Amino acid sequence: MDPRDTAPDSWEQEDDVEATIDGQLESAFTTLNVNAKPFVPNVNAAEFVPAFGLKAHPANVDSAVAVEKMSTMEMSESAAPVENGDAEMTAEEPWDQKEVEPSEEEPGGGVCVDRGPEVPDETAPEMMEEEEEVLVPKVPPTQPDAPKKEHINVVFIGHVDAGKSTIGGQIMYLTGMVDKRTLEKYEREAKEKNRETWYLSWALDTNQEERDKGKTVEVGRAYFETDKKHFTILDAPGHKSFVPNMIGGASQADLAVLVISARKGEFETGFEKGGQTREHAMLAKTAGVKHLIVLVNKMDDPTVNWSLERYEECKEKLVPFLKKVGFNPKKDVHFMPCSGLTGANLKEPANMCSWYTGLPFIPHLDSLPNFNRSSDGPVRLPIVDKYKDMGTVILGKLESGSISKAQQLVMMPNRHVVEVLSLLSDDVETDDAEPGENLKLRLKGIEEEEILPGFILCNAENLCHSGRTFDAQIVIIEHKSIICPGYNAVLHIHTCIEEVQITALICLVDKKTGEKSKTRPRFVKQDQVCIARLRTAGTICLETFKDFPQMGRFTLRDEGKTIAIGKVLKLVAERD
């Protein structure tokens, strides 16, 4: 199929083409020779045969062809140059003319009749070349090339009401993923509820409960594209009741955006003990996010008014904490001011903010170095969610390996053999998927009831490990009293949530030297590091941190707080 017949990827590019052609037309009209001799067609001319090699036409035939082509194609968006007259052109013409007829009346169809043969001969090649230049980059992004853009999953984290969903909605609007009309509709609906500043977040908070309360509950998903990369937005909930959902979102991310509010009082609440700014940053690090962008939001607020002092104050308070969590402030963390509601400094630099000289948010994302992912590893796809829709559909991020249509895979830990019926990467159907992509898979050979979030899809040759008992190194982050063997908590490992018990404390680890104690400790307390044996209530899939970091790190939570973070050192075989 001719690539020009397919729908373009972005309609904005199309508009630009039309604009350049219009500009060219105007200049062509100004140089129009009004006193030219009338055009007399040569009846005895040789018949025009479209082919690449034919150069030597009689001059008048050539000009006649040029005039005819010009009049039918000047307004056509997907016109091709006359010089390359392929054989398909004849088939394409009726379709082109259908497109052109309504639009040709506007610039004044009658002018084309007066046009002398000399002028089109000079301007036609120029115009067509110009059009050719604009059209060239548009042919490659047909479907087969689309997945070649690097996929990056960005999770938006931060305290409740920092503006995560609003920034997500604004980015989708700025990149053309949500049209203006939909946003106007949201704005009207939000106004009716006296919540007019919430309308942007509705692009990501889609269910009624989230819209009524203005709080994200589940991890919202959307995607947008830049010139070089394809991004999936994971909009995590900020409320402390929904931290388990946020952990699920962060476990799929390559990059985290920590949104903090610069408004007086709001930053302080989010950052104090019990605020979600600290907890989210720590959970993101534990979930394996290497790069963190800190967006200082609400800079347009009257209490802030793009003040550099306030920006620096937020920065000074955050840097020592992020250092403590394990981020390197020089390499892994990037601060930038923005306003989610007005969209300032998200795509274009903000005029009010002359002191910030770095790139705005979206260009900065585009300029980040590529992630190195190996597609030849074993298939590992932790399942985030599942539902029924003409078969069993699962959602998850492909951590390693590659999956293709009709491939036979194994669902662990149940060892069900399944077949991939169809693959959707960010709602676009594909035949195969690379690591880092967010996928929806339709499976055959398993019922929806037999799957739980936290199960892993593997290839039969290389199954992931599953079990109940493992040894892990744990850092106790926050716990009032001591922790002894027999202590129960909730384990969050990749997308799996399971109840766990610390069955034995093996040794303490010195934080500075890494030395292990010779004797077994009787208990551990806050800020200590220990190696312990843990046993889960049910069988779970996991790997050692050394072999597969994404499936070897975990958090322990209890009473709505994150108690500890840790990594799996050794899997212990079950004693029958």
Image (cartoon, rainbow, N blue to C red):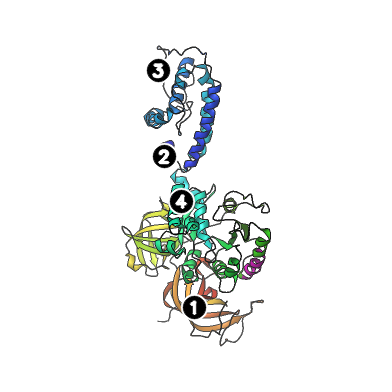
The mark lying in front, picked from 1 and 3, is: 1
The CA distance from mark 1 to mark 4 is: 40 Å
Q: Which residue in the protein does label 4 denote?
A: 183
Residue 225: % across, % down: 51, 50
Residue 208: % across, % down: 40, 61
| Earlier sequence position, callout 4 versus callout 3 | 3
Label for residue 429?
none
Residue 163: % across, % down: 53, 60
The mark lying in front, picked from 2 and 4, is: 4
Label for residue 6?
2
| Earlier sequence position, callout 2 versus callout 1 | 2
Q: Which residue in the protein does label 1 denote?
A: 558
Say whether residue 57 is magenta. Answer: no
- Tell me the residue at 42%/55% (across/down): 189
Q: Quadrant of the N terminus?
A: top left
Q: Nearer the viewer, residue 38 or 252?
A: 38
| Earlier sequence position, callout 2 versus callout 3 | 2
